[in-house]
Amino acid sequence: MNVVEQALPYVRAIAPYQPGKPITELARETGIPVEKIVKLASNENPLGMSPKARQAVEQAIASLERYPDDFDLKQAVARHTGKAMDQVVLGNGSNDVLDLVARVFLSAGRSALYSQHAFAVYPLATVSVGAEAIAVPAKNFGHDLDAMLAAIRPDTRVIWIANPNNPTGTFLAYPELKAFLAKVPAHVMVVLDEAYNEYIPPEERLDTSTWLGEFPNLLVTRTFSKIYGLAGLRIGYGLTNSAVADLMNRVRQPFNCNNLALAGAIAALDDQAFVAESYRVNHEGMVKIQAALTRLGLDYIPSHGNFLTFRLPDAAEVNRRLLQQGVIVRPLVGYGMPDWLRVTIGTEPENARFLEALEQALK
């Protein structure tokens, strides 16, 4: 018996998370120059990071010999959200916050619920601590809240919900979501993952963190990886009641957020003009890609994120042809959607390049 066989069985059973194909990998495989490749696979902000964030990161390089001090970002997040600092939990990306939830509330003999076609990290975080991950069948590619309520077992301790959902872009109306929270047992933690919150139209958007006083078992997570354009710095946060935040901070790694990420995030919060421009570019690109998919006779799922998921007669082959043209999108086989691809909304030239390549791939 070797050392690998001594690893915990549930760890050996995990299927690793598969990220979108990197630009450099496709360049190596095809010989296409990096600058000629368009990546629309990982829901990154095509505008990059805000100028204020970039300047702050460059200035922070001068103090990288020092361990991080996250006080200023906690204060900035608290001010931005109207919450107390002791309600803020910082993470190395919001994925890190999800992992903290699993470490605090899940273990062998406990279970967590998530929706079919929801973010792949939910079952990974659950199984990584020995708990059982229960996939609840989706309704119209989104969360079926009634089915999720019915699926709660005596051993259930966490419910994962993405709103908007990744990779389908579906959106739960806030009254429906709040009614759901009122029916969830008080001992079950509900994690509301709002990574794409800033892409929801302003007239439809509600600050769900205002519900924290009413629901002590609620955690709202948000990220700087999407509209703020800091995906490579890995920074995110959770908002919850102070007692839950205290438990999560007990298992949080010391200095889990690095100096560059902290500086960039503080500056990014202060650049809401960049956020507004990013929203505008995404909205306009979404409208054009939806119209083009309709013209091509392709079905798509209406999206509240910065991406669009669409159906093809042979998604795997079309994806291969897109890659040959230097365009990277996201296959959804791992999400149980083998006939679908997901495309991130890019800049106007990137969107045009994608649509041109797609038309060629469909021939």
Image (tube, rainbow, N blue to C red):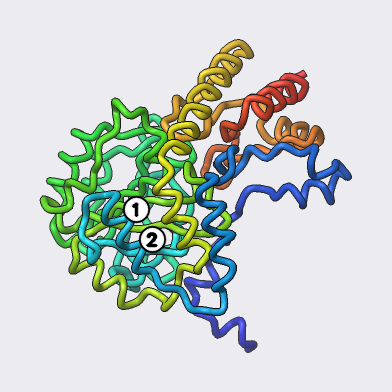
The answer to whether residue 252 is left or right of residue 62 is: left
Residue, x 37% and y 74% (percent of image)? 252
Q: At label 2, which amino acid type do we have? A: Leu
The answer to whether residue 113 is left or right of residue 229 is: left
Count the marks.
2
Circles 1, 2 touching at the beta carbon (< 8 Å): yes
Q: Quadrant of residue 41?
A: top right
Q: At label 1, which amino acid type do we have? A: Thr
- Of the two numbered discs 1 and 2 on the same chain, state the one appearing first in sequence: 2
Residue 208: percent from left, percent from top: 23, 43
Q: Residues within 10 Å of mark 1 (few under 14, many from 20)?
A: many
Residue, x 51% and y 19% (percent of image)? 287
For the residue pair 147 and 282, the one nearer the viewer reads as 282
Q: Residues within 10 Å of mark 2 (few under 14, many from 20)?
A: many
The answer to whether residue 18 is left or right of residue 118 is: right
Q: Quadrant of residue 288?
A: top right
- Which part of the image, by quadrant, shows the N terminus? bottom right
Residue at numbered disc 1:
221
Residue at numbered disc 2:
98
Residue 40: percent from left, percent from top: 63, 37
For the residue pair 311 and 135, the one nearer the viewer reads as 311
Query: In the rendered view, would you say 126 is above or below 179?
Result: below
Residue, x 25% and y 36% (percent of image)? 206
Residue 150: percent from left, percent from top: 22, 46
For the residue pair 151 and 27, the one nearer the viewer reads as 27
